[in-house]
Image (cartoon, grey):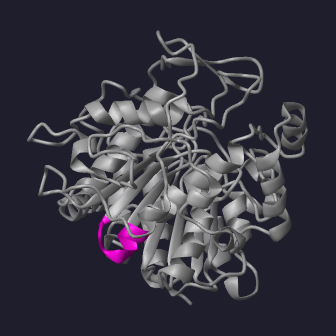
Amino acid sequence: ASFDNAHLCVPCNDNSNLRKKGAVVVNVELSTPEDNLIKDVLPDTNSLRMVESTDITEAARTESVKSPPTNQGSHQTGLVFESGSKHFDRHNRFHKERPLRVTSIHDYLLKSKLNDDNGATLVERCHILMPNEGVGHKGGYGNNGKSSEELFLDNDDYLRVHLPGYMQRLDRIAKCTCNDRLDIEGEQFKSIYFTRDSVREAKAAASSLCRLVTNVVSGNLDNGFAVIRPPGHHAEPGLAGGYCVINNVAVAAAYAREKLGVKKVLIVDWDVHHGNGTQKCFIDNPNVMYFSVHRYHGGNFFPFLDHGGPNCVGNNEGKGFNMNIGWNNKKMGDDEYLVVWEKLLMPVANEFKPDLVLVSAGFDAARGDMGECDVTPECFARLTRRLKTLANGKVVCALEGGYVRSVLCKCVETVLSALLDSESEVKCKQELQTFYKKLGDMDMLDCIDPSASKSIMETIKAHSPYWECLHSPEE
């Protein structure tokens, strides 16, 4: 059975930038033959914008956040931008993972007035994290002339998740001034490029996220979104990969536990690719739960590893705390993701009782992006609203993938709006009532793609020994 036109997810009211099911999508970016790289076809975007990133200084350790938002009915939501402007592919300025991803989001949010009756933009409603001369309340970028000594994190903060030998290697790369040598270093990893500033930019991204997490955990903010690059979830303890140099979310989770007194962290990864790096960082850890929903195809989808499947549940004391839902078909959309949330993630998360939720917020599973899935921006907002019911609402999102900018900007916009919305709990209850009303007497697994149902059931079976909420009635 299926809902046909009556899908479980109520569609977004603004369909101007969305593709209806069965319609033809016209992207503003086109793939080039080489390695699926993106080439812009929008006017004035054919040159790489070298917009400076957020400055991060020692003062950030005690610095709070910039001025209250204009909408006092909103949650106190933090926002930080780190474009990594000096980290880019020197051989292909149209590479899909480049600074323009972040600067485009920044410019888009400066104009967005989604769901605000007072006419304030999303950026004006947020608290922009402010070091000495960083981003102002109305947006913009500070001085990118930051040295490693000025970054918020210490070496020990990286060593909680990355191996000493790997960090020493990154330090050597950071001192390298020979482009040929940098190319050789990049070739040692899968889908990695380096400039002489790449390591510094990667540390800046992790630093920005940890500053935001600090403000949320301390109560200065309710939640937040770190629009940062390079991404991080493919970076393993001893390996870069998949455009990721330092694992931002893993560093932040370990930082929160060690420095901020957080006992339990839930990491939710909805990027279309499995976060093999994050999984490996916490595979033995019962206090950091990693939950990932991604395309898997039996290990034949990037990162092309077999441990992104349902049977990888964790090791030793960490058994049951690593949960993978691996899709084996394309075009998984709103209904499939909502069912994953209600059938699996939310019951387990409520049993786990996290003190902090970190989201590896990749948007390449969005409708119209390169991941060939079909999740709408409004669905990402709904997933966010559900997560806000956990950990007293302490939810921090960090950008991972998402490469078609028109799609990416819209997804970030809806998620940020959900984070800001102080009425999200009421909306969440209304959405759940509608969800279960549409289900009626049907099992939700019978209302989605059969392949998706099978993937979910495989994960439930693998984890049922570890979670009471997953026990079958006869048990």
| Image coords of residue 159 (percent x, y) | 72, 72
Q: What's the residue at 43%, 46% (across, down)? A: 334
Instruction: Give the left or right position of residue 282, taking residue 61 as reference.
Output: right
Q: Is residue 4 visible?
A: no
| Residue 74 or residue 151, whichever sits in front | 151
Does residue 352 lie above or below 37 as drawn? Answer: below
Q: Residue furthest left?
A: 118
Q: What's the residue at 70%, 17% (across, down)? A: 32
Find the magenta span and give its range.
Answer: 214-222
Instruction: Give the left or right position of residue 127, taking residue 167 as reference.
Output: left
Q: Residue furthest top?
A: 43
| Image coords of residue 44 (percent x, y) | 47, 11
| Image coords of residue 30 (percent x, y) | 60, 17
Does residue 171 lie above or below 388 as drawn? Answer: above
| Residue 216 or residue 284, whichever sits in front | 216
| Residue 84 or residue 113, whichever sits in front | 84
| Residue 82 or residue 249, whichever sits in front | 82
Give the mark count.
0
